Amino acid sequence: MPGGLNGKKSAYGGRTSVRVVVVGDKGTGKSSLIAATASETFPDNVPRLLPPTHLPDYFYPDLVPVTVIDTSSSMENRGKLIEELRRADAVVLTYACDQPITLTRLTSYWLPELRRLEVKVPVIVVGCKLDLRDERHPVSLEQVMAPVMQEFRETETCIECSAATLIQVPDVFFYAQRAVLHPTAPLFDQEKQCLKPRCRRALQRIFTLCDHDMDGALNDAELNEFQVKCFHTHLQPAEIVGVKRVVQEREQNGVNDFGLTLAGFLVLHTLFIEKGRPETAWAVLREFGYNDDLELRHDFLPIPTKRAPDQTVELTNVAIEYLRGVFRLYDIDNDGSLRPSELDDLFQTAPESPWGNDPYKDAVERTPVGNFGFKGFLSEWALMTAIDPAHSLANLIYIGYGRDPSSALSVTRRRSVDRKKQRTERNVFQCFVFGPKKSGKSALLDSFLGRKFSDDYIPTTEERYAANVVEQLGGVKKTLILREIPEEIVKKLLSNKESLAACNVAVFVYDSSDEYSWKRARELLMEVARRGEETGYGMPCLLVAAKDDLDPYPMAVQDSDRVCQQLGMEIPISLSMKFRDPNNVFCRIISTAERPHLSIPETEAGRNRKYYRQLVSSSLIFVSGLIAVAAAVGVTGLAAYRTYTAKKNA
C-alpha cells in the first residue's frame, strides 16, 4: 500500500533499547563486524573481544539504540556466554563465508545449543567475510539457508556481509533490531504460510471497527480513514485502485462492489509480512492498542487501580445491558442459549475464547446439552470481572463494546464501610467455602450449578469457582460466587494478609455424621475467624451440616449450637445434596452477605482486644477531660492576673 504503508515507522511496544548478542565459532569475524558497524570503517586492529558497543538511536529509522555484546566461544568463557544469551533480545549467529565448516556448525552445534539453553529470541544468521569467498564455487544463500530456516523457525533472517568492504554491514543489526521491535513470529506461521490465529482475530476486530457502515467491506472513504489513522497520510484514488488490484490478484473474493472485504484486508497484511515488512502490520496493530502478545495494552484498559483490598469490581448496568444485547444477537436459533459454535462466533475477535480454561471452565450452570443460558452467560462475566477486571474489560472491548471503557466497570464500597452502615450496595457476592476432605464442599458447588449428585469421591486439590444468579423473595437477583478452598491450602491462603479481603461470607462445610469432620471444621472456623480479626477483614460466617441424610454424630448438634452461640453466629444449616434438600442455602448465604455487620464470629482473643481498645479509648477520653479542665483553669487564672495588673497600673 502506498503512503504510510510503504515505510513509515510505527510505535513498537514501548522499548527504549535493544540488546543484541553476537555468537559464533572463533575466527568467523564477530568482533570485526561489530567494530565496522560502529565506526563505519574497517578497523586495522580489532581486539579479540570487544566491550559492549552502543549503536546510537539515529543509526535506525525506529530511533531505538542498540547495544551489541561480543562473546568468546572458548570453553573457559562459556558461563559468561550463557549469561549474555539469557539477557539477549536478539542473537546474531555468525559463520565465515570462506570456511564451509563454520556453516555446517550452525546446524550441528550452535542452533541446537541455543534451543537447549532455551534462548527464545529471534536469531539472525550472518555470513561474514563475504569478500574472501572462493568465487570459483558460487553458493546460493537461499538454497543453503532454506533448509536451516525450515528446521529452526527461530531463524528470522539470513544475510551475508563483509566488514572489509562494508557490504551490508549496517543491515545486520538493523535486521536484528527489527526482529525485536517488529517480530514476525507472533503474526505469521512460516510452516503453514498463513496468519496466526491471534493476528487474524486482531485484524478482524480492526476491520470491524473500520467498517463504519457495517456492509462487510471497506469502501474508499473507510480505507482512506484507516490509512490516515495508522500512517498519518492520505491515499490517492489511483493508489486505492492499485491496492485493490494487488489484493484481487491474490484473493478473488478480496474485493467486491462495496470495497475491500475482510478476506482482502487479511490478504493485504499477509502480503506485507511475506515481503519482509512486518513493521507495517505492527503499525496497524499497535495503533489499535495491541501489545507484542496481540492483546490490548494496559493503557487501553482504564481499570481502577487505587482501590482498597476489600473493594471489588463489578459490571455496571450499562455493560450488562450491552451483554444482554450481544447474547440475543448471537443466539441465532433463538432458543435462549448459546451453543459452543455461537459462543466461538461471539469471541471471534478476541485473542481466544476466555472461558476455555480454569478458573472459568465448568464454573457456571449450563443447559442439559452443554449450552450457556443467559444466567450462566452473565455469571461467567461476573466471575471474570471479580477475579480479573482487566481481562473482563479487554474481552468486552474485543467483542465490540464501543462506549467509554470506564463506563463498563464500577468499584464497590469497602466492606468495612458496609459493616458500619449495616448494609451493602453490592450485586455480586463472593463466598469462600472451607471444610475438611469429604465434607461435601464440591457437592455444594455442583448443587449450586444444578448438577446431579454423584457418590464418586474426586478430591479437589486446587481452588475451584462456581458462579450463578440467585433469585430472592420479591424477585431481586444477585450473583453469588462460591470459591472452594481445599483443606491443604488453607494455611497458605491465610498467610496472605489480604486473602480474606474480598470474602463477603465464609461457609464451613462438615459431614454431620462424622466426628472428625465436625472437629476439623470447627478448627478451620476458628483459624479463619482469628485471621479475620487480626487483619480487620472479618466476615459473616455460616456453618453447613452436610450429609443430613446420614445418621448424625450425636454430639455434633449440641456442640455446634454451643460454638455458634459463643461466637455470635447463626445455628448450622442442615442439608443433603444427595436428596436435594429444599432448604435454600444459597439464599441464606446472600441474605447473610447483605447484613455484613451480623454473624461475624468473635473469638475470645478478639473480645480481649476489643475490651482493651475500649479501655484505652475510655482512658484517653478521661485524660482529655482532665486536660480540658486544666486548660480552662489556666485561662481563668490568666484572665484574673491580667485584670489585677491593669488595676495596679491604673
Image (cartoon, grey):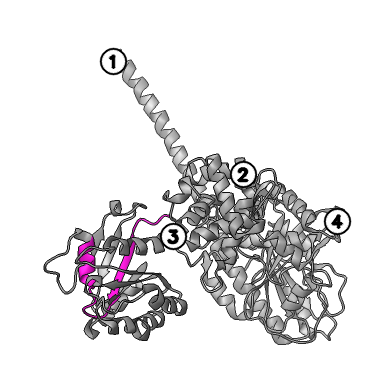
Q: Position of residue 336 (x, y in %)?
A: 84, 60
Q: Residue at x 68, y 82 (%)?
A: 519
Q: Earlier in the sequence, mark 1 or mark 2?
A: 2
Going by the image, does 147 lie left or right of 462? left
* Amino acid type of the residue that numbered disc 2 sits on in the rendered structure: Asp
Of 298 and 260, which appears nearest the observer? 260
> Which class describes the residues within 10 Å of circle 2: few (<14), some (14-19), or many (20+)?
few
Going by the image, does 64 lie left or right of 606? left
Q: Please tell me whether mark 4 sits on a helix, a strand or a loop.
A: helix
Q: Can residue 414 be seen here? A: no
Q: Residue at x 77, y 72 (%)?
A: 572
Q: Residue at x 79, y 71 (%)?
A: 370
Q: Which residue is mark 3?
A: 182
Distance Cα–Cα, label 4 vs label 1: 83 Å
Q: Which residue is mark 4?
A: 473
- Camera-nearest label, 2 or 3: 3
- Say if mark 4 contacts mark 1, CB within 8 Å: no
* Amino acid type of the residue that numbered disc 1 sits on in the rendered structure: Asn
**Residue 403 counted in the magenta span:** no
Q: Which residue is mark 1?
A: 649
Distance Cα–Cα, label 4 vs label 3: 57 Å
Of 536 and 389, which appears nearest the observer? 389
- Camera-nearest label, 4 or 1: 4
Magenta highlight range: 14-37
Distance Cα–Cα, label 1 vs label 2: 77 Å
Q: Please tell me whether mark 1 sits on a helix, a strand or a loop.
A: helix
Q: Earlier in the sequence, mark 4 or mark 1?
A: 4
Of 257 and 90, which appears nearest the observer? 257
Q: Is residue 627 above or below residue 545?
A: above
Q: Position of residue 315 (x, y in %)?
A: 67, 52
